[in-house]
């Protein structure tokens, strides 16, 4: 049989991957459709060199190299060299060997040509009189598949299906390539085609040469080889996922929680590796690594859902580990689940690889002996790779905030009439030490709170202490949420529309933010202490940004009535009218009277009032002032003192109707035992500076 000349790799090495148009229109490998944080520290046990985690990727196992070798083999099939030449002439310069073969096989007839080279008793043909032109390509493919299964006795589960070839997933095309190579193996065994393909050119060389390699070549070699290794690790992970599904090791929900969009991730990464190897095949003077990352910047969004799911992925994998360990499979797959550490190492690889790209590019720019233009291109590529990493970190943060918000909803024991739906998005949260602005700075004034910053409000919460006397009569359901975490009490809130300033102070070992807001009648403030300067900057920036947004909104709105100092309702509340009193008894319409003892230490005075439980702040303030002015020169309205109540040794300011109700409700909680026994008791309030 006559053989065609072997295809030189230079056929592909002259093509570039610079243009996004070339990627999106001239190949079957466009960046995938856009989908609807730092690597773990070094340490841990030393792995054996032959462990699957440490195994370097096989150069010949990448789809790019497989298709390159397959192209050479196909040219030895009688009549196939002309088919390949025709495809190459019709292809754009940007077309890679994978795309070229995929297009060729999709025509169907080339597959029949491969099978017919076996000189079967019945040659494969498509009757043009019976099959419309539109369906002939797939009809030819179907005949090839049928012949492989029925005549060549290939097991059907080892063949591809029509959608594998005509779909747009590289995993499907890998199956097609395997079947074609298998037919070529038969042709070689029967002596119809030659098995000697020659050395050929490669995308890189793994052999040791006498020529000393430059540092640039070392860096590029590391990038290409580690990219191959990474893709082959993803392929192993996908193979493991498939086996878990086939054997029903865990539920479908668990599979989804662990692997999420792994298939899409692998599909994209194979396409990216093709571009990496194609770029590496070009002469050094033509290689533009920076532009490659710019080209795929948006396509890297496929990583965001996978990495944002990392926490849930690890939790589910660890919960199901004993089952996953029994999955079986090849030696490599069994090694993946030798220990929880092995499995999580594989599941973390996408994030580790994403974090590695900017580092590799920086090394190439700084040590690659490049001209200024190429260094600029690399710098642009670094920006693109860093932006991808930043975006995935933001996706992780968003997922964390969603989880924190759901937990907050279930843990707060009493929202005091607030509606969390009106708070806007949760922006930041954490547990910090708070120092009251009027506390004089003593340690007794420091409290640890869980702080939640929303678009509209900042909340301070504290965990219920089950050991406190007043809480001992409460049931576990009242004390803990469904996960067993202590319920939270609302201890304070600041509406962002009232914030006037946020001042940060950073000294070695001391990072604080002092927040000022409009109280009634003056300015209030308190201090949050952070553990790091980075956290401090993040909070100060976000608080100030919210403050500015409200300020800008007030300036630009000439038709909207401005809120007064003490008006803390959200817009949706004003539109709804009066809020139903959450503390009122549903079956009683009569007001309930309450005895209030007011202490004013600065005037050396104590007084007692009897008020209704739904008294307004202004009415309460007026009645206290009327009492004070009979015997002192002190008053609440002058701002000399402020009205406060005691909550777990904290003096909390009363500035609005809502605060009055919160004070009464807090008192009810503190006096629960007395109230249950029928005693009336009295609430104590304080007039303090």
Image (spheres, rainbow, N blue to C red):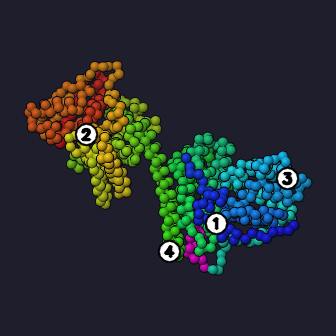
Query: Can residue 140 be seen here?
Result: yes
Helix or strand or loop: what does disc 1 sit on? Answer: helix
- Give the residue at mark 1: 278
Around disc 2, counting alpha carbons within 10 Å, would you say few (fewer than 14), some (14 to 19), or many (20 or more)?
A: few
Q: Position of residue 214 (x, y in %)?
A: 57, 77
Q: How far is mark 4 from mark 1, CA to CA?
A: 23 Å
Closer to us: 274 or 591: 274
Pinpoint residue 597: horizontal percent, then vertical percent. Answer: 19, 30
Q: Quadrant of the C terminus?
A: top left
Q: Tag 4 or tag 2, which sits nearer the N-term?
A: 4
Front residue (pair 320, 234): 234
- Mark sitting on residue 564: 2
Mark 4, residue position:
372
Label whose residue precedes the other's in the sequence (1 or 3): 3
In the image: residue 101, left or right of residue 376: right
Picture quarter with the N terminus: bottom right
Callout 3–callout 2 Cβ contact below 8 Å: no
Q: Which residues are magenta?
A: 212-223
Q: Are the residues tagged 1 and 2 within 8 Å (C-beta)?
A: no
Q: Secondary structure at mark 4?
A: helix
x 31%, y 37%: residue: 569
Q: Earlier in the sequence, mark 3 or mark 2?
A: 3
Point out the frontmost of discs 1 and 2: 2
Sequence-wise first label, 3 or 4? 3
Dominant SS in magenta = helix
Residue ID at (24%, 41%): 565
In space, the residues marked 1 and 3 are separated at their CA atoms by 36 Å
Q: Which residue is mark 3?
A: 125
Q: How many marks?
A: 4
Using a 10 Å C-alpha cutoff, classify the residue at mark 4 as few (fewer than 14 neighbours), some (14 to 19) or many (20 or more): few
């Amino acid at each position: 049989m006559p053989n065609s000349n072997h295809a030189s790799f230079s056929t592909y090495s002259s093509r570039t991957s610079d243009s996004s148009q070339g990627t999106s229109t001239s190949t079957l490998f466009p960046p995938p459709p856009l989908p609807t944080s730092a690597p773990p520290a070094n340490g841990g046990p030393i792995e054996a060199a032959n462990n699957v985690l440490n195994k370097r990727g096989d150069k010949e196992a990448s789809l790019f190299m497989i298709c390159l070798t397959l192209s050479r083999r196909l040219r030895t099939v009688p009549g196939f060299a002309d088919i390949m030449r025709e495809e190459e002439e019709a292809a754009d310069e940007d077309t890679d060997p994978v795309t070229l073969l995929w297009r060729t096989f999709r025509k169907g007839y080339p597959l029949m040509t491969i099978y017919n080279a076996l000189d079967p008793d019945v040659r494969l043909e498509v009757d043009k009189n019976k099959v419309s032109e539109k369906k002939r390509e797939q009809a030819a493919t179907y005949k090839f598949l049928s012949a492989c299964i029925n005549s060549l006795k290939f097991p059907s589960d080892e063949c591809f299906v029509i959608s594998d070839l005509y779909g747009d997933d590289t995993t499907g095309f890998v199956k097609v390539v395997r079947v074609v190579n298998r037919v070529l193996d038969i042709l070689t065994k029967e002596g119809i085609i030659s098995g000697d393909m020659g050395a050929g050119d490669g995308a890189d060389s793994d052999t040791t040469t006498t020529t000393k390699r430059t540092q640039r070549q070392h860096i590029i070699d590391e990038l290409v080889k580690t990219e191959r290794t990474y893709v082959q690790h993803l392929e192993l992970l996908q193979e493991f996922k498939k086996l878990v599904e086939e054997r029903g090791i865990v539920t479908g929900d668990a599979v989804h929680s662990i692997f999420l969009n792994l298939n899409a991730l692998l599909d994209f990464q194979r396409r990216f590796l093709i571009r990496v190897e194609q770029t590496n095949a070009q002469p050094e003077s033509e290689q533009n690594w920076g532009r490659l990352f710019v080209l795929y910047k948006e396509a890297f969004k496929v990583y965001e859902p996978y990495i944002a799911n990392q926490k849930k992925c690890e939790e589910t994998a660890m919960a199901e580990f004993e089952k996953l360990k029994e999955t079986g499979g090849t030696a490599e797959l069994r090694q993946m689940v030798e220990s929880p550490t092995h499995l999580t190492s594989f599941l973390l690889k996408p994030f580790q690889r994403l974090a590695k790209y900017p580092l590799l590019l920086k090394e190439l720019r700084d040590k690659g002996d490049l001209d200024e233009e190429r260094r600029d291109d690399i710098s642009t590529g670094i920006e693109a790779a860093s932006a991808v990493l930043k975006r995935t970190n933001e996706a992780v943060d968003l997922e964390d905030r969603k989880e924190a918000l759901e937990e907050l909803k279930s843990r707060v024991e009493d929202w005091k009439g607030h509606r969390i739906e009106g708070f806007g998005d949760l922006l930041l949260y954490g547990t910090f030490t708070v120092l009251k602005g009027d506390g004089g700075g003593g340690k007794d004034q420091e409290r640890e709170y869980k702080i939640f910053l929303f678009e509209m409000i900042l909340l301070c919460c504290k965990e219920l202490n089950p050991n406190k006397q007043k809480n001992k009569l409460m049931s576990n359901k009242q004390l803990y949420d469904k996960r067993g975490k202590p319920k939270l009490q609302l201890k304070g809130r600041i509406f962002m529309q009232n914030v006037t300033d946020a001042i940060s102070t950073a000294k070695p070992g001391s990072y604080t933010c002092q927040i000022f807001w409009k109280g009634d009648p003056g300015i209030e403030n308190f201090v949050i202490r952070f553990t790091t300067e980075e956290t401090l900057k993040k909070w100060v920036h976000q608080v100030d940004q919210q403050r500015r947004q409200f300020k800008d909104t007030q300036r630009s709105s000439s038709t909207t009535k401005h809120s007064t100092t003490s008006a803390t309702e959200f817009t949706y509340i004003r539109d709804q009218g009066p809020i139903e009193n959450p503390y009122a008894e549903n079956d009683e319409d009569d007001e309930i009277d309450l005895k209030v003892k007011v202490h004013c230490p600065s005037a050396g005075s104590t007084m007692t009032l009897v008020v209704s439980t739904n008294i307004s702040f202004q009415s309460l303030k007026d009645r206290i002032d009327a009492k004070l002015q009979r015997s002192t020169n002190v008053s609440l309205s002058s701002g000399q003192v402020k009205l406060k109540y005691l909550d777990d040794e904290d003096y909390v300011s009363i500035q609005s109707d809502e605060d009055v109700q919160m004070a009464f409700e807090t008192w009810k909680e503190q006096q629960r035992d007395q109230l249950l026994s029928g005693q009336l008791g009295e609430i104590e309030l304080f007039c303090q500076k």
